[in-house]
Amino acid sequence: MNRKIFYLLYNAATRNEKLKKTAVALSKCAELFFFIIYGIGALMIFMSGKYLMLAKYLIIPFVTLCYNTFLRRILKRPRPFVKEADVVSLRGHKESYSCPSNHAASAAVIAMSWYCIMPQAVIILMIPAFFTGVSRMMTGEHYPFDVALGWLIGITAGLLGFVIRF
């Protein structure tokens, strides 16, 4: 099922030039978009003088990315363009481990981090987080399981760090 969904998305992108360009652009722009969104959020919290919240806002995504990277080194799953003979990275990505997706986890936890600034923004920010993951599959860099696990890690970290009160 994982490979079937991957090939459905990847083949759709490789067979349609407009879709391919859109997937590549979305995959590239997602990094900048979430970096900017994250920076705006940090600035807003800083300006409000809520420094404890700012520390939490900065630490939780960092810890999430560290955990994600640690898990990648344990799982050691190759990227589709490494494992599948008929797949190339449409972005020219370097060979590295694929699972869980750092982009999916980062986008999800950054979207979730906005809960402490403006809770209703989380739902809106989860839309580009979703398409970030889909674009990573379409460009041949991740299998659906890689992306789904990244989303799960990012959302779980966000729920534990920003939504659930202990």
Image (cartoon, grey):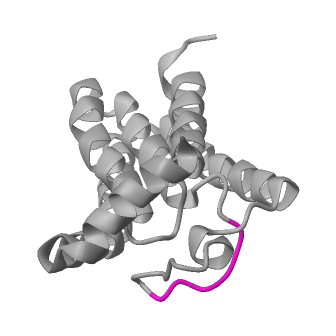
Residue stretch in magenta:
92-97
Q: Nearer the viewer, residue 114 or 65?
A: 65
Q: Nearer the viewer, residue 22 or 128?
A: 22
User: Which image quadrant is residue 16 in?
Assistant: bottom left
Q: Nearer the viewer, residue 44 or 126?
A: 126
Residue 125 in view: yes
Q: Residue furthest left?
A: 18
Is residue 72 positioned above or below 24 on the image? above
Q: Residue visible at 30% across and 76% down?
A: 14
Say which quadrant the C terminus sits in.
top right
Is residue 152 positioned above or below 15 on the image? above
Q: Residue furthest top?
A: 166
User: Which image quadrant is residue 119 in?
Assistant: top left
**Coordinates of residue 164 in the picture (x, y in percent):** 54, 14
Is residue 152 positioned above or below 29 on the image? above
**Coordinates of residue 76 in the picture (x, y in percent):** 81, 62
Q: Nearer the viewer, residue 3 or 154?
A: 3
Say which quadrant the N terminus sits in.
top right
Residue 29 in view: no
Q: Residue visible at 47% across and 20% down?
A: 163
Q: Is residue 107 magenta?
A: no
Kindly report the secondary structure that dominates the magenta region of the rendered protein: loop
Q: Is residue 94 magenta?
A: yes
Q: Residue visible at 43% across and 59% down?
A: 7
**Coordinates of residue 36 in the picture (x, y in percent):** 31, 64
Is residue 118 positioned above or below 165 on the image? below
Q: Residue visible at 32% across and 34% down?
A: 117
